[in-house]
Amino acid sequence: MKIAILTGAGISRDSGLATFRDSDGLWEGYDVNKVATIDGWNEDPETVLKFYNARRKQAWKAKPNDGHKALAELEKQHDVTIITQNVDNLHEKAGSSHVLHLHGSLFEAKSEMNDEEIFQLGDEEIHYGDKAPDGHQLRPNVVWFGEMVPMLDPASRIVSESDALLVVGTSLVVYPAAGLVDFYTGNLPVGVVDPGETTIYNRPNVVYIRESASSGVKKLIQQLEL
């Protein structure tokens, strides 16, 4: 069975990684409009780099929780692809081998003028003045609000070809990622794990587990008999 799994920040919350939606638009003290938009980068790249350097250190030390691990275990029985909005690598740490990062990775850098050449960072910092080989400033290889999502087309294709769709830890309010659910045409119910209400809460043919990912993913897999 082909299973597509769409994950968001909520799955990493139990691993200690905060989301900006938890605190009125502030992301660990930073205004999201200042550090997670292309306009913020253009206005104050030094502050943006400082913010992502801190996030990178935090995510590098974080450990996958039971939600990540349960999705990795699912690979032993099915053809699983995880489409994540997260920029951490916790799915990979848990053992998932097919992970599509919609919004890039904290652990990669690129030139601000060239999306094609990617550099592996590990947990190293990027400083203002650090240049790519093309002579332009290095920036995190993440997709900010106001930028195109280059992996959206392959993600849409994966969802459309899947027999089952799970949605974990995302409220599905941020587009274009939220629109991926509309590409699903499988017969099984859409499985959702999130402690709050998502935009598909009242959608027909949905199995909804209103719990955190660390406890809810296993229950969802059991309920759907996957």
Image (tube, grey):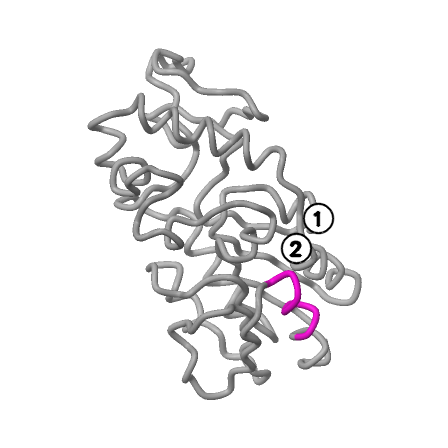
For the N terminus, the quadrant is bottom right
Read off the residue under disc 1: 94
Residue placed most toward the observer, 214 or 112: 214
Q: What element carries label 2?
A: helix
The quadrant holding residue 214 is: bottom right
Identity of the residue furthest to the right in this view: 76
Q: Is mark 1 on a helix, strand or loop?
A: helix
Question: Which stretch is magenta?
Answer: 213-219
Query: What residue is at 46 percent from the left and 26 percent from the top?
Result: 53
Determine which of the numbered discs, if any, sits on residue 110 in the image: none
165 is higher (above) or lower (below) than 96: below
- Residue type (three-letter) at the residue carrying disc 1: Ala
- Residue type (three-letter) at the residue carrying disc 2: His
Question: Was residue 23 drawn as part of the magenta stretch in this picture?
Answer: no
Residue 180 image point, x, y percent: 43, 66
What secondary structure is the magenta-colored segment mainly? helix
Residue 57 image point, x, y percent: 54, 29
In the image: residue 24, left or right of residue 67: left
Q: Distance between the residues labelled 2 and 1?
A: 6 Å
Query: What residue is at 51 percent from the left and 62 percent from the top?
Result: 169
Read off the residue under disc 2: 68
Residue 140 image point, x, y percent: 42, 30
First of labels 2, 1 by sequence position: 2
Query: Do the residues under discs 2 and 1 have CB atoms within 8 angstroms?
Result: yes
Residue placed most toward the observer, 199 or 82: 199
For the C terminus, the quadrant is bottom right
Query: What residue is at 65 percent from the left and 75 percent from the top?
Result: 220
